[in-house]
Image (cartoon, rainbow, N blue to C red):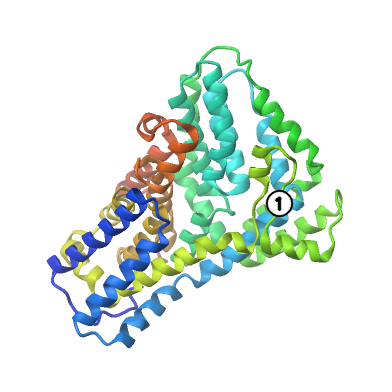
Amino acid sequence: MFRISSTITPPFREALFLILVIITLMAVCIIEFEAVPHMPILFAILLLIIYGLIKKVPFNLLEEGLIEGSKTGLGAIFIFFFIGILISSWMIGGTIPTLIYIGFQFISPHFFFAIAFLVTCVIGLSIGSSLTTVATIGVAFVGIAGAMDISLAITAGAVVSGAFFGDKMSPLSDTTNLASAIVRVNLFEHIRNMGWTTIPAFFIAIIGYAILSPNKEIQQLEQINALKDGLLQTGMIHWYSLLPLVLLIVLSFKKVPAILALALTSASAIAVAYFHQFFTASEVLNILFSGYTSQTGIAAIDSLLSRGGMTSMMFTISLVLLALSMGGLLFTLGIVQSLLRKVESLLTSVGKVISAAALTAIGVNVLIGEQYLSILLTGETFQAHFQKVGLANKNLARVMEDAGTVVNPLVPWSVCGIFITDVLAVSTMDYLPFAFFCLLCPLLTILFGLTGKTLTYIK
C-alpha cells in the first residue's frame, strides 16, 4: 500500500492522536457494545474523511485512497469465494466428516490433554475454523474434563491451541488465505513456510500436554461416542472421501496456483459425492453457493457440518474491503508515514524489522481485539520495510500469523477471547498460561528473526 502517495504530511502528534481515537472507537464498539468490527471501521473511515476535508484534501483524492486500498484485497476475495465452494464440496464429498471421524479415533484414556490438543488440531485443519472447533469438539472435551474432575483450564488451553493450529495451517482458513493474499505470496508456499515456527511449537506443546496429563482412566466418553455414531449415520464416512485431500496436497507440492488447486479439488469432491449419495445439478449449485446444511438431528454434528458456500465468505470479504479501504485512507492522509518516520531510523536490521512487525500485530490484537485488523494493518505497514532489509514477503506473512492469528484468543477482550470464554465457561486468564501453541508462535517468530534462522531473502 506504500504505492499510495500521501496528499498531506500531518505532524506526529496529530497522527498519533487520530490513531488513538480510531483504536478507542473500535475497542469500545467491539468490547463494550459487542458490535461486529464492520461498524467501527466504517465510523473510522468517516472520521478520516472528515479529517481529510478539514485539511482541504479534495474528496476525489480521498475516494481514490479508499479504492486503491481496497484493490489490495481483490486477490484474497477471489480466493475466499473458492474457499467457500471448497468447504461445501468437501462436506457433500465426505472429506471433512471423514477427517473429523478420524480425529475422534485418537481419543484414549491416557494423555488426555495431549489427545485433546491433537484431535482439535486435526479437526481445525479439516474445517479451517478455530471458533467452530472450540464451540463443538472443544465443548465436548471440557465436558469430559469436568465429569472426571480434570483441570478445565489446561483442557481449555489444549483445545484453544489445537483449534488455532488448524486455523493457522489449514488451506481452508480465511486468516491463512488473507495473510498470503495481502503480501502476494502463494497460499501453499505460505503454509509450508509457516512450518518453521509451527512444527517446533506443535511438538513442544504436545510434549507439555503429555507431561501435564493425569494418569487416570477416562470413563465419561459418551459425548465423543455419540458424535462418532452421528457421523457414521450421515453415510459420508469412507476412505475414498479423502481423495480430494490427497489431490490438494499433490497440487500444493506441484505449486499449482491456489485458485486452480481449490477449483480442481472442489470438482473432485463433487465427483466423489456421487459414490455415496445422489445430488441433482440444481442441488449441487445451491450447496456451492449457500453451503451444506446437515440434518442429522444431533446439534453438535449439524453445527460442525453445516458450513461452506460462497455466501459464508461475505462477512470476511466485507470486513477485508472495509479494513483495507481504511488503510488506504491512512496512507493517503500520510498518517502511517508520519508514525513510521519516528521509528524508521530504528528499523535497520532484519531482527528489528521482524520484532517490530510482530509487536505491531500483537499490539493491534491487544488494543483493538480483532485478528483480521492485526493481519491487515501489519501486512500493509511493513511490506516496504521487509523488502528494504532484503526479506521475502513470505517472512512477513509468517509473522502476521504467528503474532496475529494465534494471539487473538489470548486477549480477554478480543473477539475470540470473549467467544471462547462464553462457550467453554473458562476465563481467558485461566486458560492463557496453558495455551502453549499460541504462546510459543510469537516467541519463536521473534527468536528466528533475531537469530536470522529459517528466513528467506530476496534473490
Q: Residue at x 55, y 39 (%)?
A: 135
Q: Is residue 366 left or right of residue 276?
A: left
Q: How many marks?
A: 1
Residue 236 can be seen in this image = yes
Q: At which x and y percent is residue 20?
A: 22, 59
For the point 53% across and 27% down, the residue is 142
Q: Is residue 202 visible?
A: no
**Is residue 410 or residue 415 the one in the foreground?**
415
Pick the residue in front: 263 or 186.
263
Picture quadrant of residue 406: top left
Identified at 77% across, 47% down, the residue is 241
Give the residue type at disc 1.
Thr
- Check disc 1 and report the residue beneath it: 293
The residue positioned farthest toward the top in the image shown:
216
Q: Is residue 80 above or below residue 51?
A: above
Crowdedness near tag 1: few (<14), some (14–19) or many (≥20) residues, C-alpha within 10 Å: some
